Amino acid sequence: MSAPREMTEARKLQLSRAMSVYELYERTMARAADWGRTDRYPTAWAQFDKYLYGGFGRKTGGDLVVIAGETKIGKSTFAANIAMRIAQSGEQVEYIPLENDYEDTCTMLAKAGGEKNLLNYKDLLYLPDEELINGDEAWNAEDLILHMEHMVEAWHIKVFVLDHLNYMFENEEQVKDELHRVRVIMRKLRQFCKRHQAVVLAISHMNKGESKTQAKVDKPNLNRIYGSQAIAGTSTKVILVTQGESCIGRDGKQRRMVEVKLERSSYTPNQSDWFAFDATDTQWLEEGVKLI
């Protein structure tokens, strides 16, 4: 049995008092007035923001958004487009590439924003120190969340992209049971978002239980997300990404289409229809809701 942790005076004070609902009245009324609005960080895709009921983030709370889909479907490019559009509005964003090289990530962000380079974003776009991600001293999920805490407190950054989320589970060695590990980390991320009123866009793969042929036929769903309800149940939004039907553009050339769906949302209605993007180039163009 582990020894009890030392009790600080601040902790003793927390344990000795309770809050009356009177103390929470104004906060509760502000939350009620804001209910359903997630327009703190719009994407500036006008139709897509309307589809999301405003964009991402609430003025009175955090937003943990899971972007899930098959491998190589375009999840990172989708997140890069969102990150750049938020940065172009003047908001700071940290992109945390747990899978791709830093140079490749910067190239993807520049292309997603329609920029030749990112020199004009030196005060808007950030990446963690490479040693934290690629250094000899292995990091774990708790280290990464501590880094995010610092970026909020020291740099006032409130929007983060985790690319991708599953690497946080694979590097977390403190908890051995896989499902429990996923739940623990997702709860820590949710608490981080709530504590700082931050937005975290977390990219996640699908489980590989189905055959590749079947996966191409079936649309992605909540049950196929890696970690299943341990991820979907903890997040505030789940956006599914899938391959759309290719079409011929106005220029007569074949266009690659990607469809996304707001499958789950804690604060707004879910969407029954998919939203289509022209993803032929790294900088995506919105097409609109694809009615079924």
Image (tube, grey):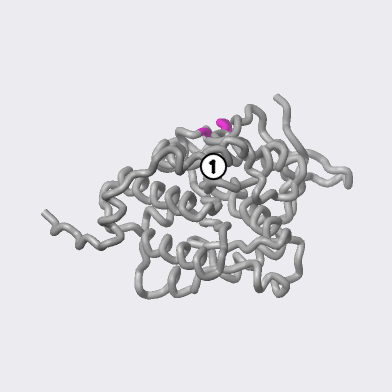
Residue drawn at the location 60% of the way across and 30% of the way down = 269
Q: Is residue 218 magenta?
A: yes
The magenta stretch spans which residues? 217-221
Secondary element at tag 1 = helix
Q: Position of residue 164 (x, y in %)?
A: 50, 55
Question: From where the camera sits, is residue 166 visible?
Answer: yes
Residue drawn at the location 63% of the way across and 63% of the way down = 92
Residue drawn at the location 32% of the way across and 43% of the way down = 179
Q: Is residue 117 left or right of residue 251?
A: left
- State the residue position of label 1: 26
Tell me the quarter of the picture where residue 47 sits: top right
Q: Main secondary structure of the magenta part?
A: loop
Q: Is residue 26 left or right of residue 244?
A: left
Q: Position of residue 259 (x, y in %)?
A: 66, 39
Question: From where the camera sits, is residue 57 visible?
Answer: no
Q: Position of residue 241 (x, y in %)?
A: 60, 41
Q: Is residue 177 left or right of residue 114?
A: left
